[in-house]
Image: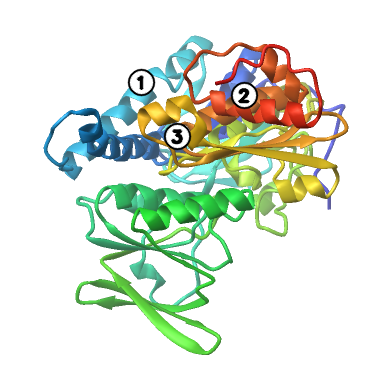
Amino acid sequence: MAAASNPTMPKATNIIIVGAGPAGVRAALRAAELGARATLVTSGEFGGMAANDGPIPVRTLAHAARLIRNARQLPQYGIVVSEPVLDYSQLLARVHDVVEDVRAHSARRQDFDSLGITVHEHAGAARFTDPNTIETQSGLRLQAEAIILCTGGVSRRLPLPGFELTCTHSDAWGLNAVPRSMLVIGAGATGAQVASIFNAFGTHIQLFQAGPRILPTEDESVSAEVAMEFRAAGIELRENFGSIESFEKTAKGIRMNFSKDGSRESAEAALAVVAVGWVASTSGMDLAAAGVEINERSFVKVNKYLQTTAPHIFAAGDVTGGLMLAPQAVQAGFVAATNAVQGPSLPFWNEVSPIGSFTDPEYAQVGLTEAKARETHDVLTTIIRFESVARAIIDGRKGGFCKLIMDRKTYRILGCHVVGERAVDITQMAAIAISAGMKVNDFLRIPLSFPTYSGVLIRAASVAARELNLPIGLDCTF
């Protein structure tokens, strides 16, 4: 059964939003802005995973890792200091302060008050008792004409002996001290961040990836570059390691037993962090009581309006299994709330979605990978290494590259992939260009400040424009 679509659905004036992460917060604000009476219900803290267990605390820890790396660069600039020493308990106190500050000032709580949105925090898990009613563990019973599910996701668990001995990324952020060694199983975005941050803190990291390369959703050149840099930084990287058989407790921590082609091996560390995927957080919600179906991946099934198989119930964010990132969740929350209040008319758009991670080195992408682009386009690619970029030379951060992917016929940018300092910031500019449909030589009419890391993008565009015999204009590159 496909997700429902009912353009004649009457305007809803009373809406419940379940979940207070980026999707839920934006959905509640949008519903109230459109005149609906909005009630936000969350099992935990306002702000959800993004503020309390996701980008905000992770980015704070990543910033600490960056400061340690920067401190080790100081002698290159004639600044003599002692070796940096991490006080992890003090760092965790800083993380707590940042989370509280963000929740108080940047999570839009004050907007909730001005719009009259009712908020129920720490309500416990919610479940449907009928299509229009939810109950929570704390005893709340709420009814509404429309409901928006924004309950997010949780780390995927593996049905393996001893799996209960392992940790999730959430447990890693909450440690009382930096472990001397760590197994990180899963080298996607989450696993790579855990490995990179704790490697900078001095932990001996063994990073395991079942597939042939780390960061499997990234362009192959990005995966190869990050893998090379991780190894250079002392991370032990095992790709194609085989299949896990079990985990077991040891005198000094934990052992993972695994095998490949009939050969059994093991690896040991003080701690094992498993980051092998993300599943919808819908356990115990009794979605069937509301007529809400899940798809083959066990995420809530939605149509292009983010409407579920129950016409008056919508879903947004990680619970739908799309791009599981805060900006996309905010966008989805806006769309879901608009359609919940006004009826399904606004489709969810996510054609241009920049993605990046604050590892060392940073990596980021927007648009198509080279392999995907070649399936349907006549492609030109240009790569500029950071070692030729003035700002990277000045800062002593010369590792990495910027890769632009263009269509030879339309001259439009199809993708941008960056590894290196400020990679995430660089791809934001590329995202705007792709969204605007800019031709590659259009970049060169913009005289950007010098020296900046964004210059690598302009240089890549300049090389492409010359190869395509396009008029270059200003070409303010160095």
Specify whether residue 427 is in view. Answer: yes
Residue 54, given in percent of the width and then of the height, sits at 43, 40
Mark earlier in primary sequence (2, 3):
3
Residue 412, given in percent of the width and then of the height, sits at 79, 28
Please name the residue that numbered disc 2 is placed on: 458
Identity of the amino acid at label 3?
Glu
Residue at position x 52%, y 77% in the image:
243
275 or 119: nearer the viewer? 275
88 left or right of 433? left
Q: Is residue 205 above or below residue 31?
A: below
Residue lying at the far bottom of the rendered structure: 262
Quadrant holding the C terminus: top right
Q: Which label lies toward us, 2 or 3?
A: 2
Residue 225, given in percent of the width and then of the height, sits at 52, 50
Mark earlier in primary sequence (1, 3):
1
Identity of the amino acid at label 2?
Ile
Q: How many marks?
A: 3
Asked where in the image residue 384 lies, by quadrant, the reply is top right
CB of mark 2 within 8 Å of CB of mark 3?
no
Tell me how far mark 2 sits from mark 3, CA to CA: 16 Å
Question: Residue 255: which numbered mark, if any?
Answer: none
Please name the residue that numbered disc 1 is placed on: 104
Please name the residue that numbered disc 3 is placed on: 421
Q: Secondary structure at mark 1?
A: helix
Residue at position x 40%, y 58% in the image:
231
Q: Secondary structure at mark 2?
A: helix
Residue at position x 50%, y 73% in the image:
241
42 left or right of 247? right
Q: Secondary structure at mark 3?
A: loop
Residue 1, given in percent of the width and then of the height, sits at 84, 53
